Amino acid sequence: MRRWLTGWRVSLRLARRDLARHRGRAIIALVMVTLPVLAVVGADVLMQTAKVSATEGMDRRLGTVATARVEILDTLTGVVQAPDPLNGLGSGEPLSRPTSVGDIEGVIGHRTMLPMPTQTTEVVRTPHGKETMVGTQLDASAPLARGLFRLESGRWPATPDEVVVNKAARDRGVGNTLTAVQADGTETTREVVGTVADATVRSAAIVVGLPGSLPVLDDAGPSQAWLVDGPPISWSQLERLNALGVTVTDRQIATHPGDYPDPLQYSSSDSGTTMQVVALIVVMALIEVVLLAGPAFAVGARKQQRSIALLVASGGTPAQARRVILAGGVVLGAIAAVVGVVGGIGAAWLLQPLVQRFSGDWLGPFDVPWPHLLAVAAFGLLSALTACVVPAWIASRQDVVAVLAGRRGDPKPGRAFPVLGVVLFAVGILMAFLGAGGHGELTVAWSAVVCVLGMVLLVPVVVSWVALVAGRFPLAIRFAARDAVRHRTRTTPAVAAVAATVAGVVALGIGTSSDERENRETYQPSLVMGDASVTPSYSYVSVDDGPTDWSQVEDVVRDRVPGARITEVAGVAQPVSGDSWTDVQFRDPAAATAAVDEGQGEISPGTWGSTLGSDVLVSDGGRLPPLVTAADPGGDVARALRSGRAVVFSSDRSKAALERVTVEVQPTDDEGQPVDPHSVDVPATVLYRAEDAATPVRAILPPALAQRAGIDAAVVGLDVEQPHLSKTAQKDLDAALQDLATPATVYVERGYEADPMARIVQWVLAALGAILMLGGTLTASFLALSDARPDLATLQAVGAAPRTRRAVAAAYTFVVGFVGAVLGMLVGFVPGLAITWPLTAESYADGRGPYLEVPWLMIAVVVLGLPVLTALVVGLFTRSRLPMATRIG
Amino acid sequence: MNTPVLHLEGVSRIHGSGELAVHALREVSFEAYAGELVAVMGPSGSGKSTLLTLAGGLDEPTSGRVVVEGTDLTAAGAGGRARLRRTAIGYVFQDFNLIPALTAAENVSLPLELDGAPSRAARAAAATALDELGIGDLADRFPDEMSGGQQQRVAIARAIVGQRRLILADEPTGALDSVTGEDILRLLRARCDAGAAGVLVTHEPRHAAWADRVVYLRDGVVLDDEDAGETVGARR
Ligand SMILES: Nc1ncnc2c1ncn2[C@@H]1O[C@H](COP(=O)(O)OP(=O)(O)O)[C@@H](O)[C@H]1O
Ligand SMILES: [Mg+2]
């Protein structure tokens, strides 16, 4: 034991001194380990800061004083709730009468109850027009409400004629008065007496006033809810309140959900998968960090060859020899862990305001999750240690006699490793197959890890092949390739680091490109590309409940789009507001009535959207919406309509033979109750359309048949052909249409547009990949150059031109980068191809797939472009002259 | 005399095999006793260094026995040989003898520390060894702050630190000027006079003059004393 300890003492001393003597190399290794630790710590601290803990959340929802919030739901049923009703709410037994405040007091006793209805949507007139804001009707100055809002300037509202707003509302132009629009369109004005900050929301505009100060646009009126004081509500009281249809948000209960039964048994999210994803990320990051830091440790170990040989000559055991190198990992890992954690916390502190600017909610208090950070620090230490395991192992097996005699004493490479590499690679491919065949994305991701590990073991073999081929190339390449082989311990991790990075980039690239392709090819345009449609728009404050004044709408469109070709589209008239609705279904007349109730026999189920205002149109076959004509080159639709037949689109081929269909019309009134359902058999032509074919409507009826079916036909929308509207122009037109007495909205078909967020993620990934690749090749080259100093000196001594050194440096960079990139590409294809199956496989929605797209351009840039670029950079910046060095490493 | 500190019995060492086999040593028998300095001479490639690495247990003989302080090195195993190097055998090479990251004192105390000695005791022993060689003032210097001769003295201090009695020196003066070289040999001689057994590899007859005995090697074979005598000339 004592020998073990003193052994470590000597090793640590040696390692420390060695690192201090070779700062450049130490810093490279340090950076490779520190940066990931720093990045993860920073991200974690920011995430924990942004995340609102249960207790913080309660302070935001209840303020800092109130015990609980109770709310009577007007469903006339009891409720069943999770400890926090936001996490789960179900309905219970029906109630015979509405619950009153007295009923609540019967359970929890007489307490102060401060009304605090649920937040509502307010429509406010601002200099920009009509905008929606969040309204809270609450006496925010009451002691019970403390902590919900912070008064920043002015005073609290004292009468229902006064309100306060937050800074976001001020930013929208709210001044000393606020004009709120009532449900009927009339406007009321309130005096703004102060500015407040909400406990949660930062960027959304907020208005706060006493109860009754703000219009309630919801028909149901303000919700009945109160903040209460007093002792915590017990679980049994909560159950009795629940039975009365009252939900309870109690500070004590909601923050300790584990102490109470959850009657709803909501299963928490599948933490198994989350754990696997975390494990996967940790393993991948570990591999990458180890490979990136590996060359520095390998060179360090080589430079210490003689020291270790002397140590062995003085009686050091192989374990003690290994420890000299491992101690280097311990020292660097410890420094990296400390610097990374401290730096990460600092970076998070500095970035906090920036993140706040992008977040609509207030971040929580600065939160340092120490247990996480300990784990990340341990990760740093572990990766540094792992990175020097192989160099240490080689150091302990070196030929001491040879090293002491001034020769190199690298042990012969083991034959078993390439075999193991092949086996691992095969297992990886198998796993990829399994993943593609239904085991899912995670299996494919793990297969990538296994493939990369197998590849790492195969790198030495590949590098030695390169040296064989290199015999025919010019001196620089030949020298670089031979050098790469001779210094396997530093070349292998460098090549493998590049390869692992490229494998990741290629795999993710194939995955995202294929996903993108699926999105593009399964995109269903609602209109002909470039066309626009104008349809009635829902408004919180309906100025006019009547049908849309289309001539007014057309005037606005013509005003903005001169010479526009506008088609009025007629269809089943649906009211814009209110709950009344006319449901139209098309059925196979032969289907049994019983089956009809089950939704069977429907020819054209579901809604395909109603970009044209309605998905059941009425037309005599004259001017049809362009998309309908575009999808019907034979003119079947127009012909059928002209001969008085209904046209029904179906994705069920077998229905295409039908000659007649049953049109079922079921209007519902404002309460959602069906009124006067009726059905009629009509002659029809059923046209087959693939599920994903572009058809924005389910059926088109000739006017006569629509009348027979008792359907009110009316103009439901406008089709505007090729208005050539920019996005800004579209917004302007939309704003103008919103300002009409009967507001409308415009949609422009722009085809498939990639999700900008996905684009950003792709770019970030590509940038990260490029940085890792550059880092891997550049550091390896730097180390190789310092390592090959004596050889280069000899080269120069025998008369090589100064630029030979540059050429050798560039060639080495290219060999490492290119070999790594090619290997990585091959390895990346395995999980890349496999992942396209689970990602884009044939699904119920589109009936096609899987989709495959290989981003060849990106791959070419990564595999050829980057190595050439780095080689050029290294060639340019390498000093061509070198002080004569002795030949002793 | 008593039992030899170092005893080689019919030792052969063959590098490689088949056509490429190199017979570095053939059936060499040889011993060194306490208080004796033995010079090993011979042309380059004659097997001198091989003999020393076998004696130090850094390499194993293809056949024959190497016994140090009564312990058969082959039978001792790798761990036993390492322990013997920490406790019984000291090495001095031609140059770059010291670990650059350690001070003179730390270099000297290295075998003791590797053996698990408490650092204070190891330091004290190192200081004593350095003082005996008259370089106590160099204790805290790093190797690159010392001259070649000073470095070799530190190496000798390391070779004798603790109760070690076998010093193996492979051309310890090869990288030094002749005056400094003589100093080093005088030191070695003194250590042997103080009770150590020394084996000195050299190709300079002048240096061999410091030895009690000369063993002459050619092509891995020990030559008879008469043949050697012709070359070496007088014994001290
Ligand atoms: N590892 C080895 N592999 C092959 N031959 C070796 C090896 N080590 C030494 N030799 C050969 O053994 C012979 C003796 O070498 P050595 O003991 O170093 O001689 P000296 O020290 O007398 O110059 C030489 O011919 C040398 O080439
Ligand atoms: Mg020699």
Image: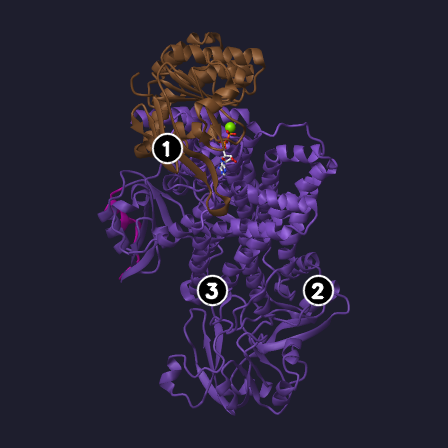
Query: Is residue A631 inside the magenta stretch?
Result: no
Q: Which residue is mark 3?
A: A838
Tell if the residue under mark 2 belongs to the same chain as the one under mark 3. Answer: yes
Q: Colour of chain B?
A: brown
Query: In the picture provided, is A862 more to the left or to the right than A461?
Result: right
Q: CA distance from mark 2 to mark 1?
A: 113 Å
Residue B98 is at least partly visible in this image: no
Residues at marks 1 and 3 on the same chain: no
Q: Are marks 2 and 1 on the same chain?
A: no
If you read the primary sequence from the N terminus, does the residue marked by circle 2 or circle 3 appear first?
A: 2
Q: On the image, numbered disc 2 is attached to which residue?
A: A556
Q: Residues within 10 Å of mark 2 (few under 14, many from 20)?
A: some
Q: Which residue is mark 1?
A: B10
Question: Mark 2 near mark 3, Cβ–Cβ under 8 Å?
Answer: no
Q: Nearer the viewer, mark 2 or mark 3?
A: 3
**Which quadrant of the rendered structure holds the N terminus of chain A?**
top left
Parent chain of label 3: A
